[in-house]
């Protein structure tokens, strides 16, 4: 059957032509000799492969036919246009192989007329005489940014990579993020615009060559269809050409090109991390919105296709996020089998705690042990194996009631962190062991007396839980890992993890226990800047070795450059360390989209704040924004519950989303900043970001001195997470004084 290859410019198809275009391509994909398709060559075309096809009475598809040595032809589809325009485009376009790097590109032989500023004197292109020079848009420069020429880049530097000479020359004198973005959007090929932005943001030429897998001295045979087909599969070409696999993919690609883009047009780096084999565990870092989740989904599918019997686990911090992964995997490929239980072939998706629960409830005999102690006793010391009921939220306070531990250490947050990061990971079950255990990474030192007092509390905590037949989530993760260890088998072949920065040591111990050490065992996606739960940890302490197998994504697909800069401002000047204990930096983070500058609004009072929010939401919906594409994010649950009432009084209906309410598709969504993790909205208002609300000082003050800096950093990260949920428009509003965490 003929192969359809989607080309660049799909978003330009007129919505009224989606259906006819889809029908046309579906017929073409099943049989290109079907009567009525009218696949015709074009007179006077620069590329003899150019064709048009009949979409309806007055509109034609523009195609390039590549026959090669295959039995069936491949068709590169460029778009649907009114008859005469289609003929003209087909006459003046060419699919060729870039002679410098082997990447297939669609070349317009005559660019549309462009305004040329007087000072731009782009030389004639050597390689591609047909391309018109690109003008540098006149935008005010940002003083901190320097033009490439000032940084001693030459046209030759760029053309050696394969960038079009005229486009390269036009780029050298541009200054300012806005101007370079606008210019990059005019690139003759998607990869060229992106590579230019990378270079402008500070990546070296060598890194860019590597990122886009640009071949040096490729063998180029433009006339050979097989060679062109191969060049269309080059990772850089696949940023704008997609080989369509089935009718579902065809339909979404046409009807919803923006929505479908992540399914079919991967960045070459994303593609590499999707398909590459690794000798052991691998870690992918990257800022919010760089497509880490997208890579995990594609990789899960790739691993499944390589071996349909493989037991693949795709997991994340909690059930809400796991549900999101399930939905997205189904969008990526509705035919992929989602396994219903861990240990079965296919892709099993669940939160880490749900996985622990599942292992515990399906391995009851291993919990108690037969002749030797069972998993529960190994982790908690001798006790009953009734552990499925969760321990209540007051348990630490209750256990500490009679303790003489100093008050600042007698807090649930200190005690639970000590338990989760020291006691459980080291399998401590006796006082003697606890008095000897090392406590690296804990902010608060403990003398012997206090250690003894902490252990007294832990003993009481454990005794109470044993009496009640309960266990907490940390204990369950640890016990589930022990169950697997005692059974001596591994229920997974590959484990893919999202939001890894938020996982605790015990959860990593469980993940390590799911899969044997070996090729492609663990694949972790993390962003240290988005750690909003738990403590800083170092992976190597939990048997996960990623040395030399760690890479970073830097291109933000979600948010505009303006929003990104604002969000990064929240992190400025603060040091973050990642799971490899290395400093995370943001210097080469960038976005390829532009939009309005975030708007920061100081309201006079709470009531004024609600008035403004109501007005904004009204205005957006009247302008046609889909109600559920608007997110109102608040620092606390209490504010989340209050906001719908306050806005309701002002005639605006919104829904507060939490664990118990599923999202209402017809209203704007209110949720806590914590809940917004992993989500995105077209328009976002951060509501109530005042000095009294963020950071949540009452929580920080309740901690021992040594833990406060980290808690403040998590509050900062929370604001960063919230600000990076906005695709297009970001508003920040507060009553009275602004939060100290907002960028100055
Ligand atoms: N290659 C791509 N083409 C188009 N859109 C993409 C691409 N990759 C990612 N996106 C889009 O960018 C957005 C962010 O992607 P994703 O959620 O995977 O990022 P992330 O790094 O996991 O973000 P976060 O850390 O904030 O959760 C999504 O809307 C996704 O569809």
Image (cartoon, grey):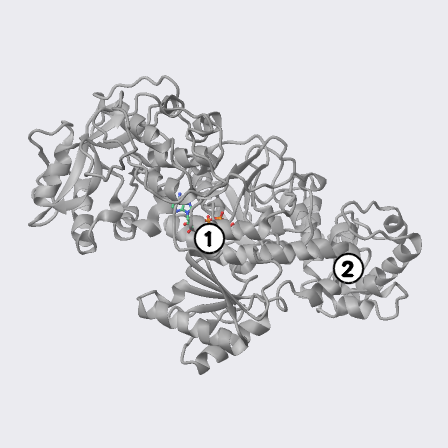
Q: Residue at horizontal 16%, vertical 27%? A: 47
Taking the spot 57% from the left edge, 46% from the top edge, the residue there is 527
The quarter of the displayed image where residue 30 is located = top left
Q: Are marks 2 and 1 in contact (CB under 8 Å)?
A: no
Q: Around disc 2, counting alpha carbons within 10 Å, would you say few (fewer than 14), some (14 to 19), or many (20 or more)?
A: some
User: Which residue is at a point 38% across and 33% down the rendered structure image?
Assistant: 173
Measured as percent of width and height from the top left, residue 258 is found at 33, 50
Q: Which residue is mark 1?
A: 563
Camera-side residue: 527 or 254? Answer: 527
Q: Residues within 10 Å of mark 1 (few under 14, many from 20)?
A: many
Q: Residue at x 45, y 31 (%)?
A: 211
- On screen, residue 204 versus residue 160, left or right, reads right
The answer to whether residue 370 is visible is no
Quadrant for the C terminus, please. bottom right
Any mark on residue 414, and which? 2
Q: Give x and y (percent) for residue 589.
A: 50, 42
158 relative to 248 in the view: left or right: right
């Amino acid at each position: 059957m003929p192969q359809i290859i989607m080309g660049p410019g799909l978003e330009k198809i007129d919505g009224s032509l989606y259906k006819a275009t889809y029908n046309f391509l579906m017929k073409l994909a099943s049989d290109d000799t079907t009567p009525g398709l009218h696949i015709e060559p074009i007179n006077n075309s620069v590329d003899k492969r150019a064709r048009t096809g009949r979409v309806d009475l007055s509109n034609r598809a523009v195609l390039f036919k590549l026959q090669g040595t295959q039995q069936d032809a491949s068709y590169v589809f460029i778009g649907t246009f009114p008859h005469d325009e289609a003929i003209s485009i087909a006459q003046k376009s060419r699919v060729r192989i870039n002679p410098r790097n082997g990447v297939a590109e669609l070349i317009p032989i005559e660019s549309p007329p462009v305004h040329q500023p007087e000072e731009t004197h782009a030389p004639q292109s050597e390689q591609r005489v047909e391309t018109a020079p690109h003008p540098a848009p006149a935008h005010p420069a940002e003083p901190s940014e320097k033009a490439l020429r000032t940084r001693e880049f030459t046209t030759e530097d760029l053309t050696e990579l394969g960038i079009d000479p005229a486009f390269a020359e036009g780029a050298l004198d541009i200054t300012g993020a806005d101007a370079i973005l606008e210019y990059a959007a005019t690139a003759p090929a998607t990869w060229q615009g992106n590579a230019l932005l990378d270079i402008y943001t500070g990546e070296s030429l060598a890194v860019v060559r590597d990122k886009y897998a640009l071949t040096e001295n490729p063998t180029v045979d433009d006339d050979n269809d097989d060679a062109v087909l191969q060049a269309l599969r080059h990772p850089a070409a696949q940023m704008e050409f997609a080989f369509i696999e089935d009718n579902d993919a065809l339909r979404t690609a046409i009807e919803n090109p923006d929505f479908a883009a992540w399914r079919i047009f991967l960045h070459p780096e994303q593609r590499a991390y999707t398909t590459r084999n690794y000798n052991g565990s691998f870690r992918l870092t990257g800022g919010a919105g760089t497509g880490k989740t997208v890579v995990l989904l594609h990789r899960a599918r790739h691993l499944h296709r390589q071996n349909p019997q493989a037991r693949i686990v795709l997991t994340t911090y909690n059930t809400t996020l796991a549900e999101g992964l399930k939905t997205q995997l189904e969008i990526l490929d509705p035919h992929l089998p989602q396994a219903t239980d861990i240990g079965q072939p296919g892709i099993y998706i669940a939160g880490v705690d749900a996985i622990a629960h599942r292992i515990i409830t399906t391995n009851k005999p291993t919990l108690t042990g037969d002749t030797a102690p069972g998993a529960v006793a190994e982790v908690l010391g001798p006790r009953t194996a009734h552990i499925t009921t969760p321990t209540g939220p007051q348990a630490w306070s209750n256990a500490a009631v009679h303790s003489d531990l100093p008050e600042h250490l007698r807090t649930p947050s200190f005690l639970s962190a000590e338990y989760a990061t020291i006691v459980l990971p080291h399998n401590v079950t006796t006082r003697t062991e606890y008095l000897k255990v090392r406590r690296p990474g804990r902010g608060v030192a403990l003398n012997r007396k206090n250690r003894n007092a902490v252990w007294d509390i832990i003993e009481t905590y454990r005794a109470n839980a044993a009496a009640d037949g309960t266990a907490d989530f940390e204990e369950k993760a640890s016990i589930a890992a022990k169950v697997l260890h005692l059974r001596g088998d591994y229920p997974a072949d590959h484990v893919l993890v999202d939001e890894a920065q938020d996982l605790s040591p015990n959860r990593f111990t469980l993940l390590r226990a799911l899969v044997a050490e070996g090729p492609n065992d663990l694949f972790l996606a993390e962003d240290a800047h988005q750690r909003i739960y738990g403590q800083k940890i170092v992976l190597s302490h939990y048997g996960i070795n990623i040395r030399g197998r760690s890479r970073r994504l830097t291109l933000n697909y979600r948010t505009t450059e303006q929003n990104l800069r604002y969000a990064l401002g929240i992190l400025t000047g603060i040091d973050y360390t990642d799971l490899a204990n290395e400093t995370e930096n943001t210097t080469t983070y960038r976005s390829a989209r532009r939009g309005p500058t975030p708007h920061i609004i100081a309201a006079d009072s709470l009531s004024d704040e609600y008035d403004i929010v109501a007005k904004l939401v009204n205005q957006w919906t009247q302008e046609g924004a889909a109600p559920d594409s608007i997110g109102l994010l608040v620092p606390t649950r209490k504010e989340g519950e209050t906001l719908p009432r306050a806005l309701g009084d002002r005639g605006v209906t919104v829904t507060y989303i939490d664990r118990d309410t599923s999202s209402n598709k017809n209203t704007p969504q209110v949720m806590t900043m914590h809940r917004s993790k992993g989500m995105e909205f077209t328009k976002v208002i951060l509501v109530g970001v005042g000095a009294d609300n963020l950071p949540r000082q009452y929580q920080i003050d309740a901690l021992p001195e040594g833990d406060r800096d980290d808690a403040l950093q998590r509050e900062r990260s929370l604001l960063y997470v919230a600000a990076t949920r906005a695709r297009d428009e970001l508003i920040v509003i507060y009553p009275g004084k602004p939060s100290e965490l907002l960028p100055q």
